[in-house]
Structures are given as structure tokens and as C-alpha cells.
Amino acid sequence: AKKIVIKIGSNTLAQADGTPDEEFLAECARACAALMRDGKQIVVVSSGAQVAGISALHCLSSPPQGAGLERHESRGVIPGDGASCKQALCAVGQAELISRWRSAFAAHQQCVGQFLCTKEDFTDSDRAAQVRYTLSFLLERRVVPILNENDALCCSDVPSVPADRRVSLSPQKRIGDNDSLSAFVALLWQADLLLLLSDIDGVYDKDPKAHTDAQHVPLVTDVSALVGKTSMGSSNVFGTGGIATKLDAARLVTRAGIPLVLANGRHLDPILSLMRGDARGTLFV
Ligand code: ADP
């Protein structure tokens, strides 16, 4: 594979307190830099803005008053009912996140470029052409594009604004999760491989966190058949992602002939061991 999209989930990227895991970012940047020296092109899709925002605000002496924040056991401070707070968290956290990525790649003399996307960047052909052009322009100059959905603007749930007056995007216009975003960019860029790094080493017949007897599935050649035989558990703490969106992403890209690998980003050297073929994961073809 020459053109690789690597998507990193928020649980993989963040530590238990929500701060981005510097060691993990350093490891990722090191692996990406090695792949690039080997002639590969890498596009990163990074989740974790909301989590990073939570921990950044938590680091302040006191969280902003009336921002709808409440304490959460493992995540420090998390949005309460005030959903507009999610947008604020994403705005703060995205800045935090990209700054950590920038430092991690700078250690390998690599520059990063930030893309904050909306669904229309992929569904509107002119905008898609623009994304494709800018991606290529950066990649030719050995810059690592880092993508995320523009959640600071894309969330549609601002409670103080009447539903018919909301200017933010309706759910139909949101991508909603980064598994889908990574599939969209893999299709648009005609990638050779989509690698999803999660906190799980592949697909199981049921959620392995809830069932100790869950069976690992190493190879999937028919996503639709697998869906019928798989219990998917629920989405994660933010109500996004989960295994269902990973299977949707797999369906989308494999239909276009792009293989997808779901692997555990927490394993030592996840990207390189995957390229060597000795990592545990699920390969979708
Ligand atoms: P990410 O942040 O990497 O996108 P998510 O937390 O959204 O990850 O989704 C991964 C989680 O999905 C796993 O940690 C696992 O608990 C859960 N899950 C539910 N059903 C399954 C299944 N059948 N196979 C694998 N993981 C599953």
C-alpha cells in the first residue's frame, strides 16, 4: 500500500483523564515518519477534540460557570444538558489536539496541516475536488494532513436556539463520526488502505468488553453477512462511533476495492507491526 489513511479513535488517543497521550502520539508520529521515508503517503484522521477540550477546561482552576459542565468519573468534566457546550469543548480541544500532533511530528522534521471538514466537502463535487487538490498539494510536499470533522460548527444541538433558527448543520449534513470521515477521505483520495486504530484488536462476534467468550474475527470478506452475525454493543460515551460505524466504513471502502484493517492502537508499534503483517486485527477485503 502506498496511500494510507490512518484513523485514530478518541479512547486510543486520550488517557483516562482526557489529555492526549503524548507517548502514543510520539509513537504514531514515529511510525508515520518511518512509513513516509519508505515512500508511503499518510493521511491522519484524528478524533479526540472533545475529550481534549474537557481535559483542557478541567485544567483551568475552575470550569466555566454555567457552561453545562458536570464532573465525570473518568473524564474529569463532561458536558451536562447544555449541548452547546459540546461545540465549545470541540473548539478548545481541537486547538489542543493539533498542537500536540504538531509537536509529535516536528520531532521527525515533519510538518502537519489541519483539515476541519463538513459532510459537504465530500458530497459536493467542487468542494471534494478542492479537498483532493489541497491534500495532494500537501502530500507532495511531505506535509501530514490531519483531518477531523469541524465539530465546533457542525453540532446541530444548540439548546438556546429554536430548532427552525439553528444555523448549524442538521444531522443529515453532519458526518457524525470519524470512522465515516476516514472512509470518505479514503474514497476521495483513492487510498490503498484504511487503517482504523481503536482500543480493540478487531471485530468480535459480540462486544468483548461485555462478554469474555467473544470470538475474534480475523478476516471479513462480506461485511453484510458479518453484521447479521455480530452483536454490536452500544456506541461510546459520547454517543458516536462504536463498532457499527466501523463496519459501515468497511462496507463503503471495500466496495471500492480499498481494504480496511481494524487494529488496537494501544499495542506497541501498532502501525509498523501491521505493515510487517504481525499485528492482530481484522482485515476487511
Ligand atoms: P473508537 O474511539 O476507536 O472509535 P469506539 O469506542 O467508538 O472506538 O468503538 C470500539 C468499541 O466498540 C470497543 O472498545 C468495544 O467495546 C465496542 N464493541 C461493541 N461491539 C463490538 C464487537 N462486536 N466487536 C468489537 N468491538 C465491539
Image (cartoon, rainbow, N blue to C red):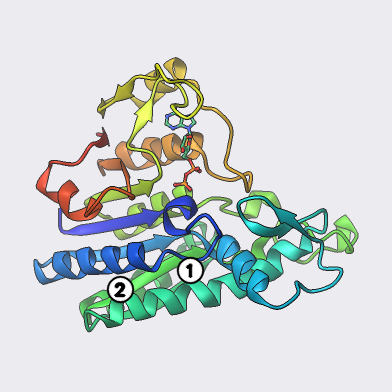
Q: Is residue 157 left or right of residue 108?
A: right
Quarter assignment of residue 92 = bottom right
Of the pair 95 and 164, the residue shown nearer to us: 95
Of the pair 70 and 284, the residue shown nearer to us: 70
Where residue 271 appears, as percent x and y from the top left, is: 22, 54
Q: Amino acid at mark 2?
A: Val
Of the pair 260 and 173, the residue shown nearer to us: 260
Q: Amino acid at mark 1?
A: Arg
* Secondary structure under the numbered disc 2 in the rendered image: strand
- In the rendered view of the protein, which quadrant contains the C terminus? top left
Q: CA distance from mark 1 to mark 2?
A: 20 Å
Q: Residue at x 77, y 66 (%)?
A: 167
Q: Residue at x 36, y 80 (%)?
A: 103
- In the image, is residue 90 above or below residue 190? below
Q: Which residue is mark 1?
A: 127
Of the pair 201 and 4, the residue shown nearer to us: 201
Q: Residue at x 63, y 54 (%)?
A: 173
Q: Is residue 170 left or right of residue 190?
A: right
Determine if residue 25 is in view.
yes
Q: Which residue is mark 2?
A: 144
Determine if residue 133 is in view.
no
How crowded pointer 1 is (Cα within 10 Å; few <14, some 14-19, many 20+) is rated as few
Where residue 185 appears, as percent x and y from the top left, is: 38, 57
Where residue 94 appears, as percent x and y from the top left, is: 54, 72
Query: Mark 1 or 2 closer to N-term?
Result: 1
Number of callouts in the render?
A: 2
Q: Residue at x 46, y 62 (%)?
A: 125
* Secondary structure under the numbered disc 1 in the rendered image: helix
Where residue 49 appears, as percent x and y from the top left, is: 55, 65
Q: Is residue 157 left or right of residue 274?
A: right
- Residue 105: mark in rendering: none
Quarter assignment of residue 264 = top left
